[in-house]
Amino acid sequence: MNIEQIATFHSPLKSKFGIPKQSGIAENLMGYITLEPTYRNSDAIRGIEGFDYLWLIWQFSANKHAANSLLVRPPRLGGNEKVGVFASRSPFRPNSLGLSSVRIHHIDYDAKDAPRIYVSGADLMDDTPIFDIKPYITYADSHQEARSGFVDQRQWNKLKVELSNDIEETLRQQHAFTDTDIESLKEVLAEDPRPQYQNDPERIYGMPFKSEDIHFKVVDDTVIVLPL
């Protein structure tokens, strides 16, 4: 079986560092999907407006090395404890396939590469290849009472984000950040992009977001965004 790329994801997140660890947790993070020329026709998505969410099947394209272990270290477990690869959502998998549920925001039928599907809450980096798009159906896809394994056993605490008014104004005025961009950046940082085994309050991290490199450090439970 040959898997053909049918679409590409476009995101303000330009590298895998900082990507939300699951879809939906940075719910204001906007991106959009463009179909490959073969499928770039409104007929391909006819009826999609009747759904609120989509499933995306995509490639962990930034992982350059093949998975070489059946055990992985999920961030939720602090990056130290191991579980089986098929008991996790690790990006280091035999077939490098990702599965994400995203919310449809709107569809642009007038763009030069229309139709564009704008979505929120994706955990995909910019230029990610998409192999399939399927509608999310509540009666089949939602299981409210389901157990979630080790995820139920470890609470994930969001970090506070300290973004000064001066830095925020610079992002708005010089880099054309919108209110949504600012809120999305805060959501991404609040999820703690650092490797979970790193906890040096003096270490400075960098993360490309839209056209800007965002630098920050983490002190106790607070992300401090540094001047641009």
Image: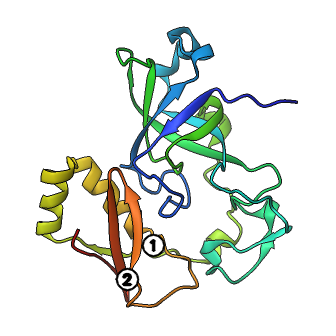
Name the image quarter holding the N terminus. top right
Label 1: element kind: loop
Q: Residue at x 44, y 52 (%)?
A: 13
Residue 124: image x %, image y %? 54, 48
Label 2: element kind: strand
Closer to the camera in the image, 113 or 190: 113
Q: Which residue is mark 2?
A: 218
Closer to the camera in the image, 215 or 218: 215
Residue contact at pointers 2 and 1, CB within 8 angstroms:
yes
Three-letter amino acid code at disc 2? Answer: Val
Question: Mark 2 or mark 1: which comes first in sequence?
Answer: 1
Q: Which residue is mark 1?
A: 192
On the rendered structure, is 169 left or right of 155?
left
Q: Is residue 77 above or below residue 90?
A: below
Q: Residue at x 86, y 67 (%)?
A: 70
Residue 127: image x %, image y %? 53, 41
